[in-house]
Image (cartoon, grey):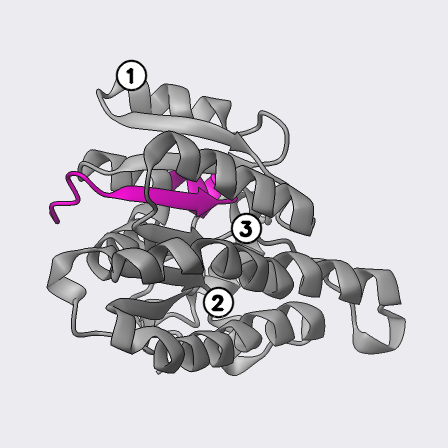
Amino acid sequence: MFDLSGQVALVTGASRGIGRAIALALARQGALVGAAARDDHAAGTVSEIASAGGRAEALSVDVTMPDSVERGVRMFLDRQGRIDVLVSNAGIARDQLLLRMKREDWDAVIATNLTATFLCTQAVLRPMIKQRSGRIICISSVVGQMGNAGQANYAASKAGLVGFAKSMAREVASRGITVNVVAPGLIDTDLTRALDAATRDQWAAQVPLGRLGSTADVAAAVCFLASEEAAYITGQVLAVNGGMYM
């Protein structure tokens, strides 16, 4: 698809779902992938990449903890010498109507989905500026574009990524670094598979293409933005939602 040979990529939230698919896809295109997750949760992703002949290493990083992010990125840099691509994907949801939402659920979602992107981007920015090249890709959501009842915290965090990326794109463009957003829609993951059939059908009915997207659909968009073919694209939101939001 896109040749990423010789590139070093760091993917957060790489243990499952969209993050795992992104890590696998980047490795298939030739990148060496740092698969970051809490504890050793990304070991399965690394094993799958290695079994397919790719190169990867697991990174134990808690993206909500500044010291953990700084230490993990520094150790990865020490071993690999550079980071060409950051995919900030780690995220959680704590859904509840605002009147009933607990402050800790608001804080947890903002910390994991938004502040963590700030921490990870800041950690990789200096080496990217030094090498005068880099790709930063934030994984947002269609909910951040259109909103959704019961997800004020999640929508705020995902919308915040768009403003963050656009601002960063302006800050670092002169250094050869692009910053973009991928905004998935309704994707077939463990979370959506847990829904009952009626609910899944109701959601799918809102998608003009008439189906849920796959994690591979999202990963393909990330590989494109990470590639040389996307060198003149920055500060943009690439929606992968089947037309759910236009």
Badge 2 or badge 3: first in the primary sequence: 3
The disc at residue 141 is 2
Could you tell whether 217 is left or right of 78 in the image? Answer: left
> Element under label 2?
loop
Look at the image and say whether residue 14 sits in the magenta stretch: yes
> Element under label 1?
helix
* Disc 2 residue crowd, few under 14, some 14–19, many 20+, Cα 10 Å: many
Q: Residue at the location (35% across, 74% down)?
A: 172
Look at the image and say whether residue 234 sits in the magenta stretch: no
Q: Amino acid at mark 3?
A: Ala
**Residues at marks 2 and 3, CA–CA distance in whole angstroms:** 12 Å
**Residues at marks 2 and 1, CA–CA distance in whole angstroms:** 31 Å
- The answer to whether any part of residue 187 appears in the image is no
Q: Residue at the location (80% across, 61% down)?
A: 105
Q: Amino acid at mark 2?
A: Ser
* Disc 3 residue crowd, few under 14, some 14–19, many 20+, Cα 10 Å: many
Q: Residue at the location (69% across, 75% down)?
A: 152
Q: Amino acid at mark 1?
A: Ser
Where residue 92 appears, as percent x and y from the top left, is 64, 53
Region in magenta: 1-22
**Residues at marks 1 and 3, CA–CA distance in whole angstroms:** 24 Å
The disc at residue 228 is none
Q: Is residue 43 above or below residue 129?
A: above
Q: Residue at the location (51% across, 65% down)?
A: 202
Residue matched to label 3: 90
Badge 1 or badge 3: first in the primary sequence: 1
Where residue 154 appears, as percent x and y from the top left, is 64, 67
* Disc 1 residue crowd, few under 14, some 14–19, many 20+, Cα 10 Å: few
Residue matched to label 1: 51
Q: Is residue 234 above or below residue 203?
A: below
Could you say which is closer to the camera, residue 79 or residue 84?
79
